Amino acid sequence: MVGETEVYHDFGINVRISADDGRSWFRGGDPMMEPFTWTSDYAINGPYFTMAVDDEAGLYIAFTATDPRFADLNRAERPRSVFLARSTDGGRSFTTSFVYRVPEGDPKVVNNRRAMVAIDPNDASKVYVTWMQSTSAQKAKSLVAASADGGRTFGEPVDLAEPVEIGGYQGRPAVGPDGVVHVIFPGAGFTAQSPPGAPEPEDPIRPLFYRRSTDEGRTWSPVAEIDPGNAGFGHGRKHLLAADPGSGTLYAVWYGSPKTRPELFDDTDVYLRASSDGGTTWSNRVTVNDPVDAGGPERQGARQYEPGISIAPDGRVDIAWYETGARRSARTSASATAASACGPTTSTVTTTWAWPRRTSPSTSPGRTPATDRT
């Protein structure tokens, strides 16, 4: 089963199902709730929805959506609520609930985007949805809401970035085998407005932050910085977090620049940090893709971006990503040891990597595939 967002005509979520190992496909159920059927905007601004599956093959789709009657408003002014759709028949039908419903008449809470969902691997009644909420006049919030009834109802959201001066983008959640909820979120880059005539402030560095909850989302650990990050919107993005369902080891993956203040079109690499002690300490940052100079002159100007991650039952970690200006675009991991860069102890994690292999043809030089990033 796959899902897609359509960004040119109906702006909804389309579910496709195959019952013959991908040889043929048919349309699945509709996860949208009337009248909130507009979820996507532009092809580069996702993810517009995320999926998760529980241990009984239940399917969950988290997304934000608005009523099409608000389509003529600026994107940041459209009242977008947060939803969770649930299916117990492999995506053929859905029951959809509000995670967070936008209250009428409050412009500070309308712009909700990029919902992500995580399920407790041993208790499907525990569901967690994260998203970001932002306006131009205040710092962005990194919100998380918890459900104890399988996603039918949710408690009040918590802003994980509330202590962070620059705010935070949407959290990336993962639940370990012990039921602990882990979330990473990058800083959002908020700065106070300069007085008239004063120079604009320098774009702040956007670190990667981490918090966890051991009581099903009721309380959260203090904010911890696990990577120094970069300045600039185009670097240090698309973070993901995965938890090994056996060992509980955490893997954070994203793309960014080795420079603290990169130029707009500088090269980007895919990075990984891991924790084997429940997020208390984290390994040194590892560059997953091969170095630019490893492939000769044709590798110069390579940009690696949009990584995805999965963990096999035997603990193998697989990471795939897009790449422009070069030949290689996927990689798998096997085993090694890394010292912690955060905290007084070490976090020992198996992270040696196989050589990348290409999984798709190259596009035109300097262009990226036409994708909705979902």
Image: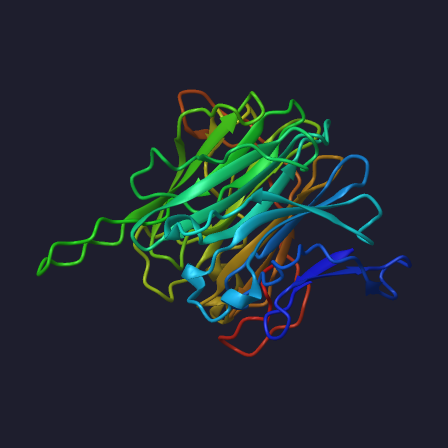
Which residue is at the front of the view, 53 or 365? 53
In the shown orientation, is residue 120 left or right of residue 216? Answer: right
Residue occupying the far bottom of the picture: 364
Q: Residue at x 16, y 54 (%)?
A: 194
Q: Is residue 90 left or right of residue 286?
A: right
Q: Which quadrant does the N terminus fall into?
A: bottom right
Percent across and percent down for residue 187 are 37, 44
Quadrant position of residue 361: bottom right
Residue 294 lies, with reference to residue 99, above or below; the image says below
Q: Residue at x 55, y 32 (%)?
A: 155
Of 112 and 339, the residue lying toward us: 112
**Outermost residue toward the front in this view:** 104
241 lies above or below 199:
above
Which color scheme does this rendered protein use?
Answer: rainbow
When asked about the image quadrant of residue 181, the answer is top right
Q: Position of residue 60 (x, y in %)?
A: 70, 45
Q: Residue at x 42, y 67 (%)?
A: 74
Q: Nearer the viewer, residue 214 or 355?
A: 214
Q: Nearer the viewer, residue 98 or 263?
A: 98
* Quarter of the image where the C terminus is located: bottom right
Q: Is residue 350 visible?
A: no
Q: Give the quadrant of residue 356.
A: bottom right
Q: Position of residue 20 (x, y in %)?
A: 91, 59
